[in-house]
């Protein structure tokens, strides 16, 4: 699903794609019951959707330290893609 962006609205990535975040993610995504194995590319909240079919059985994202560190709100980044924040939301929050 494409995201429509107005001229005054920008979207930026929230989660940094770093080796440390990848290590943390691998500890949590690696046990997720919704993912095919191995869950590639890992760090879906920073890298985007899995190319594999997702079976929504449960989501480990809320238990991940990255989820809390970046104050994420959505689930199933393996299916929905990168966590993003609109610039207007930043001004409000």
Image (cartoon, helix red, strand yellow):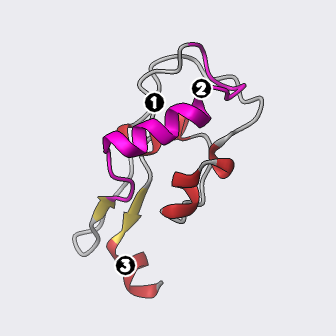
Which one is earlier in the sequence, the residue at label 3 or at label 2? 2
Q: Position of residue 79 (x, y in %)?
A: 54, 33
Q: Would you name the residue on which mark 1 appears?
A: 42
Which one is earlier in the sequence, the residue at label 1 or at label 3? 1
Based on the picture, tell me whether residue 19 belongs to the magenta stretch. yes
Q: Label for residue 30?
A: 2
Which one is earlier in the sequence, the residue at label 1 or at label 2? 2
Position of residue 88 relative to residue 71, above or below, is below
Q: Label for residue 88?
A: 3
Range shown magenta: 13-37
Q: Are marks 3 and 2 in contact (CB under 8 Å)?
A: no
Total marks drawn?
A: 3
Residue positioned 38% across, 44% down in the render? 20
Residue positioned 44% across, 36% down in the render? 23
Q: Are marks 1 and 2 in contact (CB under 8 Å)?
A: yes
The 10 Å Cα crowd at callout 3, few under 14, some 14 to 19, many 20 or more, is few
Residue positioned 33% across, 52% down in the render? 16
Quadrant where the N terminus is found in the figure: top left
């Amino acid at each position: 699903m494409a995201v429509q962006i107005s001229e005054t609205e920008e979207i930026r990535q929230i989660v940094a794609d770093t080796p440390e975040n990848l290590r943390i993610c691998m500890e949590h995504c690696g046990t997720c019951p919704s993912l095919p194995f191995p869950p590639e590319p890992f760090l879906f909240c920073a890298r985007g959707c899995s190319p594999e079919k997702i079976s929504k059985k449960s989501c480990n994202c809320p238990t991940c330290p990255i989820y809390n560190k970046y104050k994420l709100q959505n689930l199933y980044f393996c299916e929905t893609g990168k966590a993003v924040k609109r610039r207007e939301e930043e001004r409000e929050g």
